[in-house]
Amino acid sequence: MKIVDFGKIQTGHFGLQKIIANLNTLARNHMSFLILGEVGSGRRLMAQLIHENSFAAGLKIEIYRKNEIKPIPEGVVLVSELQFLNFREQEVLIEQMLSSGSKTIWIATAQTDLHELVRRGLIRKDLLAQFQKELRIPSLAERAADRVFLMDHILMTLSWVMGRVLRLSREAQNLLSHYHFVENIRELEQVLESAALLTTGSLIEVEHLKLNHEVKKSTQKISTLAEMERKLIMQTLELTQNNKSQAARLLGISIRTLRNKLSQYRGELNREYSQEVSYE
């Protein structure tokens, strides 16, 4: 598979090549983008490519995160991890997107299938409808053709920084070629950076590779759908001052469903408490 260099992203994955090749046209059409992909897969780099090919290339990217919704700027707004926004933040974001007109390009990133979250009532359908183009970034596990190239590219950069040529032994390269990196390219970079510090020579062996939990620096907890559902329900009850009828209307569920959910949560808490006090 031929590796194509798009500047910030180099890839041999045909689907990713096709997405990037069309960005120049898409970014100039004043569209809003939703970028889906796992942590460390290159979503932020994709957002930068959209920015550089848009009318707002000369302006900086304004980054919105949870609890940080700000006044609308002109240019490009990147909404980081859309799936973690609570009900009120989603409402504010919709209002801002509708009122910003063509002066702002909106880009959002997410780790999971938002259509499923819409079905479960965790993401508003009208918020998802604001994004006109959905781009899915394949994980490193899906980009087999890119692994060796990425390892060589990272080692070349590390060699320049450390002032000595670095290379992988055959065994180390074989291990990294088949290892599942939960944090994708970010984790691969962390593994190789750590290995470069551990070896005093040029050759990186298997024993220099600190895999699994030792290299995972991210402490962000990835919530399950059930956890996100529970969190949204509790936030809505807090917003409505524990008015269950009003909370059910806002959540788009029946009062009976809400009561069943709350009963389920109480049962889970009781089981957790029983386990904590058990001496068996």
Image (cartoon, rainbow, N blue to C red):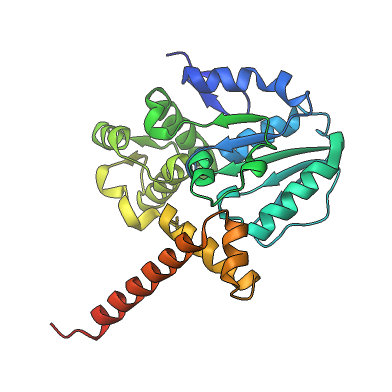
Task: Give coordinates of residue 113: x percent, y percent.
Answer: 49, 40
Left/right of residue 147 with respect to residue 245 in the rendered view: left
Instruction: Indicate the position of residue 156 as horizontal and vertical percent values.
Output: 49, 33
Look at the image and tell me in which quarter the C terminus lies: bottom left
Residue at 60% in and 72% down: 243
Residue that appears at 31% across and 32% down:
177
Specify the quadrant of the image occupied by residue 76: top right
Whether residue 24 appears in this view of the structure is yes
Q: Which residue is drawn at 48% across and 48% down?
A: 120
Q: In this view, does 137 lie above or below 196?
A: above
Q: Position of residue 209 (x, y in %)?
A: 31, 47
Query: For the N terminus, which image quadrant?
Result: top left
Q: In the orientation shown, which residue stands out farthest toward the left?
A: 280
Looking at the image, residue 185 lies above or below residue 195: above
Give 54 or 83, whichever is nearer the viewer: 83
Q: Is residue 143 left or right of residue 45?
A: left
Compared to 258, does 123 lie above or below?
A: above
- Along the viewing direction, whichever of 127 and 244 lies nearer the viewer: 244
Q: Is residue 86 visible?
A: no
Tell me how many marks there are. Answer: 0
Image x and y of residue 249, in percent: 61, 59
Q: In which quarter of the image is residue 269?
A: bottom left
66 relative to 222 in the view: left or right: right
Nearer to me, 62 or 195: 62
